[in-house]
Amino acid sequence: GDSVTQMEGPVTLSEEAFLTINCTYTATGYPSLFWYVQYPGEGLQLLLKATKADDKGSNKGFEATYRKETTSFHLEKGSVQVSDSAVYFCALSDQGSARQLTFGSGTQLTVLP
Amino acid sequence: DVKVTQSSRYLVKRTGEKVFLECVQDMDHENMFWYRQDPGLGLRLIYFSYDVKMKEKGDIPEGYSVSREKKERFSLILESASTNQTSMYLCASSQTGPGYTFGSGTRLTVV
């Protein structure tokens, strides 16, 4: 079945540091890929998405590129801020199972001033 | 923007009680979902629905049921709450195509 593997957390960075959160996936079809963010005490919000190979999703300074050859969708940001502290979830939606999202386990990011 | 509203942010219930978690969306979305979120396990799908009066089991349906009598409302029911159902419950909705809108979550504690 489909699965998503994220790097283990928690991740702690200083403000303005470079961020990478690794995400790899297993899927039978041609999935769409997503990053969701969950701020403390809130539900999940869509951060960015990519629907086909080589697409780059971007939002709020975050980027991720859909790499079919390595089955990866790593999240990056060049300079993190304290306000980026949150839990980040990688997810996929397989065309074969339509409309359902499969999530990774989440990565807790803490940014220190 | 689509809004998904979960009726309670925090609930405390006793073992054996019947528990109702309510979710309402305001953008006429066809698809609605219930997940539970646990540390280290990410989000796991409990039930979902593609239409009124329609439901399908997700990955962990045991101990849960759902009801969708109206398009905008999707209820999760714990028939007899147990301590291992203590968790964060997240409702989501979507229209055609991938990507969800989530509610703020209900943190349920069963004592």
Image: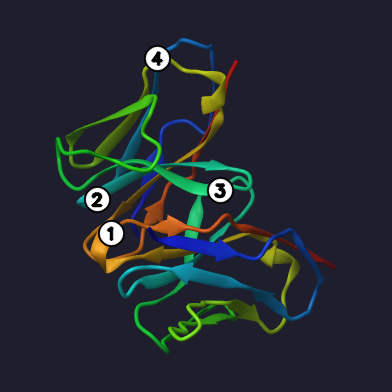
Labels 4, 3: front one = 4
**Residue at mark 4 to residue at mark 2: CA–CA distance:** 25 Å
Q: Are marks 2 and 3 in contact (CB under 8 Å)?
A: no
Q: Do the residues at discs 1 and 4 belong to one chain?
A: no
Q: Secondary structure at mark 2?
A: strand
What's the residue type where badge 1 is placed?
A: Arg
Residue identified by numbered label 4: B18
Which chain does tag 3 point to?
A
Examine the image and state in which quarter residue A88 appears: bottom right
**Residue at mark 2 to residue at mark 3: CA–CA distance:** 21 Å
**Residue at mark 1 to residue at mark 4: CA–CA distance:** 30 Å
Q: Which mark is residue A42?
A: 3
What's the residue type where badge 3 is placed?
A: Glu
Q: Which mark is residue A99?
A: 1
Q: Secondary structure at mark 3?
A: loop
- Label count reads 4
Residue identified by numbered label 2: B31
Identify the mark nearer the N-term, 1 or 3. Answer: 3
**Residue at mark 1 to residue at mark 3: CA–CA distance:** 23 Å
